[in-house]
Image (tube, helix red, strand yellow):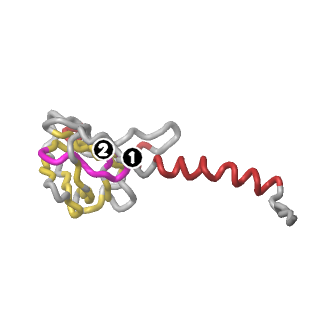
Amino acid sequence: MIKTISRMTPTSRGASAFLPMILGCLMVGCGPSRDPNLPATATVRGQVLYNGQPFTQGTVTFHPSGEGNPGVSRLDTEGRFSLSTYGSDDGAVIGEHVVTIDVPPPLDGEDSSQAATIPAKYANVDTSPLKVTIPEGGDDTLELVIEK
């Protein structure tokens, strides 16, 4: 009679016990990423300019005129943004939007003379002159221009 000897160490036995659990967790992440009943979104990327220069502070928000959540993004050091609505970088709801730009006040101890300011009308959905229509194919070259 031939006897086989297992060469599994206690560590490898523990790792093999966790393998099915790890694979199960990975497979759960392969399903639909969001509720199919939510309004469709399309990729939206662009840049905010003020006085011809990139505006680099604050948050840009696309408020849909119909159903759906707003799309939001922080502005980077070049004034660029990539909107997220229901998931990271999924864009904005397809259709018409009013765009607002929020600039945070300076933190305690920061030099308030260096804080970025834009006209207050851009921070309010009722007064912002920025209006954008997002097509089904999205828009990755959007340019938002802030005027005095």
Where residue 16 appears, as percent x and y from the top left, is 70, 54
Side (left or right) of 95 relative to 79:
left
Q: Amino acid under label 1?
A: Ala
Question: What is the magenta range?
Answer: 84-96
Q: Nearer the viewer, residue 63 or 15?
A: 15
Up-down relation of residue 108 to residue 32 (above or below)? above
Which circle's residue, 1 or 2, is located before the other in the chain? 2
Side (left or right) of 58 relative to 13:
left
Please check the rendered image and state whether residue 34 is part of the magenta-colored stretch, yes or no: no
Q: Which mark is residue 115?
A: 1
Q: Amino acid under label 2?
A: Thr
Residue drawn at the location 20% of the way across and 55% of the way down: 144
**Secondary structure under badge 2?**
loop
Instruction: Specify few, some or many for label 1: CA neighbours under 10 Å numbering under 14, 14-19, or 20 or more.
Output: few
Does the rendering let one see residue 36? yes
Which residue bears the numbered disc 2? 85
Side (left or right) of 129 relative to 58:
left
Instruction: Specify few, some or many for label 2: CA neighbours under 10 Å numbering under 14, 14-19, or 20 or more.
Output: many
Figure quadrant of the N terminus = bottom right
Where residue 32 appears, as percent x and y from the top left, is 35, 47
